[in-house]
Image (spheres, rainbow, N blue to C red):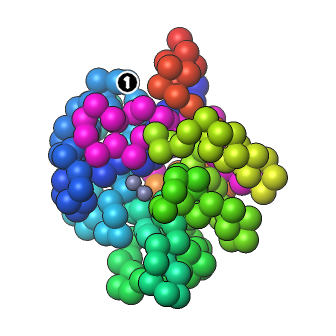
Amino acid sequence: MGTIFDLHLHTTRYSNCSRLSPRAAIKRAAKMALDGIVITEHDTPWGENEIEELAEIAKDRNLKVLVGQELRGYREDGSIHGDLLTFGFHDKIEYRPSPREIIDTVHQEGGVALAAHPFRSEFGLEDDVYKLELDGIEVLSPHHLILDTMKAERVCEELKIAGIGGSDAHSKREVGKFLTYFENEIKSEKDLVAEIKAKRCKPVSYREAVKLRT
Ligand SMILES: [Zn+2]
Ligand SMILES: [Zn+2]
């Protein structure tokens, strides 16, 4: 049996735009019978000890909690170029990086970088996804209209990179709206990075996730 994860969530701990506390995220995800969540705060990594504490709480509820980041890429003129989800990367980037700099830095650390909601206006990489060495792309996102999702699916096929789904939750009700189904079990961040690299995953809605389960 596969594993179902929400790979894109913001909590009140480090994303001041979020109304979702880490504990509430865990509770909600466990109630929805997800296998795990990845907390992806804006431009901020969680500390090692903080993760452990949270992982213990989640363990009692049969849920895996991992931590990634959502890093914002900028153009040379300072304007926003697009957001990237990164996994297996724990440093804080102290300047305004370009998407290419983010990807290179994350790859040097052995992590993966994926385009977050690529066709969301202002915050997506749009067609620049074709120019970058991405490991994957968020196909299902609440910020995508149907045509955006179709475009993202095409990018996935053409570039032969991983496709994922993420809720981009900032509140309890948004958790798990879009998800990623992994063929294998994800027990650690290492597994997550490896499975994305191997493209053994697909974007699913919560409804599809429930069907895969039953
Ligand atoms: Zn974003
Ligand atoms: Zn986000």
Amino acid type, residue under disc 1 in the picture: Ala
Q: Is residue 127 left or right of residue 68?
A: right
Quarter of the image where one finds residue 135 = bottom right
Any magenta on residue 12?
no
Q: As rendered, which of 48 and 129 lies closer to the eye? A: 129
Please say if 54 is above or below 105: above
Q: Residues within 10 Å of mark 1 (few under 14, many from 20)?
A: some
Any magenta on residue 180?
yes
Residue 128 screen position, x and y as percent: 67, 67
Q: As rendered, which of 142 and 121 lies closer to the eye? A: 121
Q: Please tell me which residue is depicted at 39% across the width and 46% down the height of the picture.
A: 168
Residue 147 screen position, x and y as percent: 65, 39
Ligand 1 shows up in which quadrant of the image?
bottom left
Q: Please tell me which residue is depicted at 57% across the width and 49% down the height of the picture.
A: 138
Residue 30 screen position, x and y as percent: 30, 29
Q: Is residue 72 left or right of residue 25?
A: right
Q: Is residue 57 visible?
A: no
Q: Write the start and end of the magenta stretch as one range.
A: 160-188
Q: Is residue 79 visible?
A: yes
The quarter of the rendered structure image containing the N terminus is top right
Mark 1 element type: loop
Name the residue carrying label 1: 33
Residue 98 screen position, x and y as percent: 53, 80
Q: Please tell me which residue is depicted at 42% across the width and 62% down the height of the picture.
A: 70
Q: Residue furthest top?
A: 214
